[in-house]
Image (cartoon, rainbow, N blue to C red):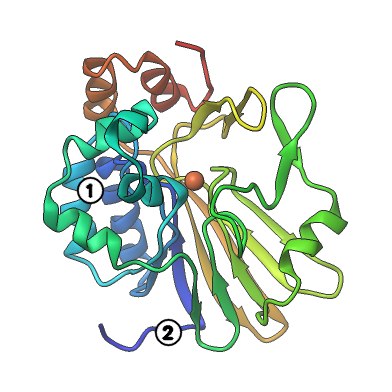
């Protein structure tokens, strides 16, 4: 890998097998003249193109980490996996899983940037959002957000997992940035209680980051792309909820 510019790069996350969204995002990143990409995990899980996504990612020198679904693909017997993980692993070959196995859970870029999937210690915890009591999620209280950042030496922390693009600046630092999801704009989950998450846009979401004179300049970019092939794959797998999410960005129960 060439030298990674830790002062100017792109952040992608939660591709979830949507290689057409990933291609659109990669084209947009190239169009911005950005070379370095940090990829925060949950690369494959879902009814879409896990294998094609793996081939695409393996051909790139992105700095990638594992998400909770990536860990589950490696750890769980297939019979105990969520359906979305079962659909992904059915497509993945041994070399895809070997690539996945080698990824760390967290990483540092230079001395100012820390990257994780959920929180520094847990890939399956929402950092910037919490259950809002209405079956959806909203901004997590500031003291709780700060608690998760304790002990992390960084001025910029990257996180993912909730699929919601958001920047939070804690009053005495750091900046915490979630780029949103490249490939899955809405989903439901049963844990820790039933809720839905929806970006309310079907566009592929990612972020650009640049170290400016007075702090981190960040830019959320939402890229329209042709999702027809991915929607067809979701329908072919019987995942109407995914098809709806990819079409609209809103969650509709299957
Ligand atoms: Fe995740």
Q: Identify the residue at horizontal 46%, vertical 64% (top origin).
A: 105
| Location of residue 144 (image quadrant) | bottom right
> CB of residue at label 1: within 8 Å of ligand 1?
no
The disc at residue 163 is none
Q: Identify the residue at horizontal 59%, vertical 43% (top origin).
A: 164
| Location of residue 195 (image quadrant) | top right
Quadrant of the image containing the N terminus: bottom left
Measured along the vertical axis of the image, is residue 88 above or below residue 146?
above
| Location of residue 130 (image quadrant) | top right
Quadrant of the image containing the C terminus: top left
First in sequence: mark 1 or mark 2? 2
Label 2 sits on a secondary structure element that is loop
125 left or right, relative to 168: left
Measured along the vertical axis of the image, is residue 25 above or below residue 229?
below
* Residue nearest the observer in this picture, 149 or 12: 149
* Residue nearest the observer in this picture, 161 or 90: 90
181 left or right, relative to 237: right
Label 1 sits on a secondary structure element that is helix
Q: Position of residue 167 (x, y in %)?
A: 68, 57
Which residue does the numbered mark 2 point to in the structure image? 5
Q: Position of residue 202 (x, y in %)?
A: 45, 32
Q: Position of residue 224 (x, y in %)?
A: 39, 39
Q: Spatial distance from mark 1 to mark 2, Cα to Cα?
A: 24 Å
Q: Position of residue 242 (x, y in %)?
A: 39, 23
Q: Identify the residue at horizontal 29%, vertical 68% (top origin).
A: 102
The disc at residue 53 is 1
Q: Residues within 10 Å of mark 1 (few under 14, many from 20)?
A: many
């Amino acid at each position: 890998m060439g030298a990674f510019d830790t002062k100017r790069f792109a952040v992608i996350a939660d591709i979830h097998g949507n290689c057409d969204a990933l291609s659109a995002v990669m084209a947009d990143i190239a169009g911005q003249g950005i070379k370095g990409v940090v990829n925060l995990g949950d690369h494959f899980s879902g009814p879409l193109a896990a294998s094609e996504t793996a081939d695409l990612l393996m051909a790139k020198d992105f700095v990638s980490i594992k998400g909770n679904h990536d860990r589950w693909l490696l750890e769980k017997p297939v019979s105990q996996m969520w359906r979305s993980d079962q659909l992904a692993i059915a497509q993945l070959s041994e070399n895809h899983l070997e690539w996945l196995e080698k990824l760390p859970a967290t990483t540092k870029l230079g001395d100012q940037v820390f990257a994780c999937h959920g929180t520094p210690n847990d890939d399956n915890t929402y950092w910037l959002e919490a259950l809002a009591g209405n079956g959806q999620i909203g901004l997590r209280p500031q003291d709780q957000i700060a608690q998760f950042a304790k002990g992390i030496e960084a001025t910029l922390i990257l996180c993912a997992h909730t699929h919601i693009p958001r920047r939070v600046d804690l009053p005495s630092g750091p900046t915490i940035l979630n780029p949103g999801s490249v490939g899955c704009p809405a989903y439901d989950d049963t844990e820790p209680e039933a809720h839905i998450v929806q970006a309310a846009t079907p566009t592929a979401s990612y972020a650009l980051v640049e170290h400016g004179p007075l702090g981190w300049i960040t830019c959320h970019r939402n890229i329209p792309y042709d999702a027809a092939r991915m929607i067809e794959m979701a329908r072919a797998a019987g995942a109407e909820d995914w098809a709806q999410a990819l079409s609209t960005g809103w969650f509709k129960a299957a």
